[in-house]
Image: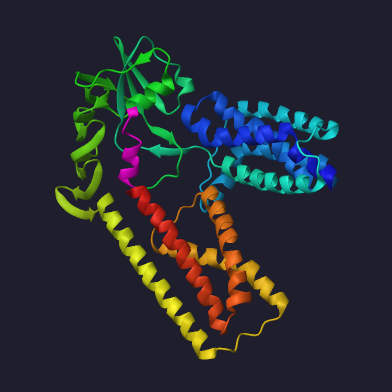
Amino acid sequence: MYDRLKNLISLPFIFCLLLLLLNDFYLKATFHNILTGKLSDFCGLFIFPIFWSAIFPRHKLWIFILTGVLFIYWKSEYAWRLIELISNVFNIQRTVDSTDLIALSMLLVAWIHIKDGYATIFTNPLITRLSAVFIGVVSIFSFCATSQQSYIQSFEQPQYVLLQSTKIPDTTSYGEFKFYKTDSLIIVGIDHLYIRRPIRDDDFNKNRSLIDLDKDVMAMIADGTSLIPAGKVTKLTINTAQGKDALRFNGGRLDGRFTRTKNNKLIIEGFYKMGIEDSTWTFRDTSSTHVVIQTFVKGERTSIKQFDDDKLVSSTHINTRADTIRNKYIHIGILILLAVGIILWLVKNYRLTFPEQLKLKLVWKWLLCFISPIFIWLLHVGMRILLSDFNHDIFETIATIIFIFIVTCPLMFFIVFLIKLRKEIDVFLYWLLLGLVCSIWTTCGTLIELS
């Protein structure tokens, strides 16, 4: 047992594990360069086969072979069907880059590591086992975390920043940017940004990514660029693949009227206020028969109207952040009322049947305590879907399952063995109550984010 676990508590394994977590949670989002993109692959291919070899020590060779084969498949273009299928349920993304395959060299390093062995931090057998279990849990957590790539915040309206620059950066290093050089200035077109948190489909969270857009872009490009002081107005026109864009900048941010023409026809017209959409935006097709008018208030859409041949065909009202906050308070109120109602129901059942109790064999009591978190999580997911607050992000889903198990499993032991069940319906009522509590907790978290 000790030989099986010692590789999990060796210094190289712990170092790569910590480096993997640091890269996935901080370095990638902060720097987003070639080094941080490759670092997770190198660290992951070191700790992944070592971890599973500790679980299945008799199949080490096959674990290493399958790790290499699966990594090659995952990084190839042939994996898109599988990714597309999984993405229907979980938010998984990956980048096809053949240069990532150089990380396969770490499999040889990992193989040498488990064959030769390294000194471990702990020598006491009990501490070794407990430490290995803890590091094993952290390893699974890291595998889940590294499975999510950086989240991509896309922008529907054109986004540009203006910087002072002596040269055009290498476009191959910045796939999310397009560069347009004019004299000593450089216009950077932003298609999307990589952000740390899962995407929420609302304008408020999108605007959070735009607050310091010029500073963020300059920090990512860095080489030979500098900010333009606020207050300096610059008007420029550039030709893009989508059309001819007329831009007005205040400092480095779009500010004022924006237009895009194509084939001498106006197809987009709108206004920016320091990089944030404002007022009315009008979108036309090239024939000008189909028109979409979107109204923005401080960057948040409040309505969308569509016209065909000057006839209104649809009108949609959109909740702003203030509307969403109000709705979340209503949701929390409803969930609390339901929880109070279930507590009163359980108290009633307790009083009506006391001192009798539901008779279950000991093995069924233990089984009930261990499987209850699964049903509580399912009820919690159902409530979040009903409240339109469910996120398909795989990392958040796994983290939620683990959290619910850690919290509700001991509670179910307390309920089953100390409070004791009175009726068969009590099992479902306790599941529903704990599911409601979890939903109240997560809804409060959403409310805090919005506020």
Residue 413 placement, left or right of 284:
right
Do we see residue 134 in this rendering? Answer: yes
Residue 444 placement, left or right of 429:
left
Quick one: 31 or 157, which is closer to the camera? Answer: 31
Quadrant position of residue 3: top right
Residue at x-position 31% and y-position 64%? 330
Residue 315: % across, % down: 21, 54
Examine the structure image and report whether residue 206 is included in the region drawn in magenta.
Answer: yes
Residue at x-position 30% and y-position 55%? 325
225 lies above or below 286: above
Quadrant position of residue 105: top right
Examine the structure image and report whether residue 14 is included in the region drawn in magenta.
Answer: no
Residue 160 placement, left or right of 279:
right
What range of the chain is rendered magenta?
A: 202-213
Residue at x-position 80% and y-position 32%? 119
Do we see residue 76 in this rendering? Answer: no
Residue 243: % across, % down: 28, 27
